[in-house]
Image (spheres, coloured by chain):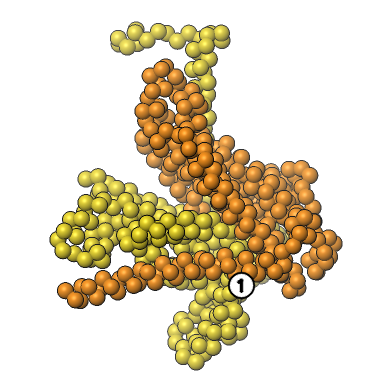
Amino acid sequence: MRSAEARPRSRFHWCDPMSFRRIKDSLTTLVAWTMSILVTVLTAAIAAALLHRSLPILAEHPLMHLVLGETWEPMNGEFGLRAFILGTVWVTVLAMLLATPICLLTAIYLAEYAGPGAKAAVRPLVDVLAGIPSVVYGLFGVLVIVPLIQDHLTPFAEEHLAGVALLSPRPESGGYCVLAGGLVLALMVAPVIISVAEEVLRGVPVGIREASLSLGATRWETVAHVTLRHALPGLVAAVVLGFSRAFGETMAVLMVVGNVVAAPQSVFAPAYPLPALIANNYGEMMSVPLYDSALLLAALVLLVVVLAFNLLAQGVLALAQRRAAR
Amino acid sequence: MSRRHAVERFAQAAMLLSTVAVVSGLVLTVGVIVANGARSLNWEMVSQLPSGGYYLGGSGGVLNAIVGSLILAVGATVLAALVALPVALFLQPEYRGETRIAGVVRGSLDLLWGIPSIVYGAFGFTLLIYLGMRASLMGGIVALALVELPIMARAMDEVLRMVPAELREASYSMGATRWETMRRVVLPQVFGGLITAALLAFGRGIGDAASVLFTAGYTDNLPRSLQDPVASLPLAVFFQLGTPFPEVQQRAHASALILLIVVLIISVLSRVLTRRLTRFAVK
């Protein structure tokens, strides 16, 4: 090998400034490697720790029994998480049903229609609001949304929606219900979905838009048939990001959702989502056997669902990039 | 043709309506918090520790939570930066930027970004039990740092990638090593951006309640060491709201306003700083 001969053999001298510089370089590279590996194994480490701590309860009860079990009586050794899982699903799905269409329309407006003035006004606002703490949104829910549901929506539902599946009124909840949680969550995830979706839409090449417009399509037709089609994977990723944010959100939901252990039958019924279960009980009822193990299993369920959705989003995006590169 | 125009009209109206709905919902949130908080916010709230009967309506303030939150968030931001900056360097083309392993690291950061903070809290608490410690400032800082890490690392990666390749190449052509190039050329260029990234994470950290709920505990005193439990603003809001006394609940509103003001100050500060510190950066 010529190159091996050409390169001077690296000799090490403390006093030689060059080898000192090289050592510093190698050291920083080593730190960069170490921290990156740390970050990479962190997710697995968290999952492993939670799994390890939920093994005691998994040894006592089969997983399916725990996840689908309907009775939650820790004192009697019954740890069915079904009501909590359904509570989480109800609140999250409702929030996404409310937020997705409105946020996507807003993102399209900002990316395709809004003039520079409207953009300059709305964009920083959305950014700032993305950083507002969840307890603040929760407090807003307690102060505005809960009374609104109790005083206006419940009477309306009693008059018009009694007996309608999923929408039947529950006056006894006092406004603390799935709908309150869904509304607060929808508001919370809106800035996240809007900013990601808008960025995706802005990434769509101008050329294909112009091609569509030059064929006589209206602006909306261009958006619907060309831009959205091109941006679809990114938009899916934006919605999934919002979903996973909503799925694990704790405080804001906990404050308005009622926290009654029962699978909700209506949006006006109270619910008890998984994060609220963990937040309300962990660290306290440690004397009850297997209780903390059950709560960490709940955390593991949350983690697994969120990771699954995030991996899905990453997969969709990677697929789209490969398709775009072709 | 008129049908197509009607569709266009309808779509535009729907989009405008959505935007107005989102914006007014968000503005309403801030407005309600400000209006309710301002009513019971006074100097005593921000300057005094809670007295004995504070949670029954006695005198005092939430200074413990304000100081606690600031210490927690500063500690977590420093700790997260110690990990995030090397990771962000690792993702640059000089190091492992365009290789498969960098993709894996980026993917991991995305996964970490999506993990709910309650899970970080539960994980932090199991760590504390494992180490034989109880809820403390140390535990809270570690849990918050985990929450902040992915936000900061992603932001720093984006910032570093904005540095023009020519600038780096000029440095390499003078015989500088990678670290020297980073330290003397790239980092000074993006200093403002890195501060912004840290402030973004700081703002997210100071408002996070679920991760410090078990790991930092809550106390009416100021922490004296890393082993002491520490109060935080989000939990102050939560606990005061949970009491049955209207005057204490009023203080929860005031505490929420304090938290909101802190977050908004950080947000504005990061914008101003970015503009100032990047004034002389090469674009």
Q: Which of these two is toward me, B142 or B261?
A: B261
> Which chain did the renderer colour orange?
B
Against B275, is A80 above or below? below
Q: Which of these two is toward me, A148 or B17?
A: B17
Q: Residue A219 falls in which quadrant of the image?
A: bottom left
- Is any part of residue A82 visible from this angle? no
Q: Mark 1 lies on which chain?
A: A
On the image, numbered disc 1 is attached to which residue?
A142
Q: Chain A is drawn in which colour?
A: yellow
State the image coordinates of residue A128 (x, y, percent, origin top left): 52, 56
Q: Kindly identify the residue that appears in the image at 37 percent across and 56 percent down.
A: A116
- Classify 10 Å Cα crowding around label 1: few (below 14), some (14-19), many (20 and above): many
Query: Where's the C terminus of chain B, which quadrant?
Result: top left
- Is any part of residue B155 visible from this angle? yes
Q: Kindly identify the residue that appears in the image at 83 percent across and 66 percent down.
A: B58
State the image coordinates of residue A242 (x, y, percent, origin top left): 45, 60
Q: In the current view of this chain or complex, which residue is farthest to the bottom?
A: A159
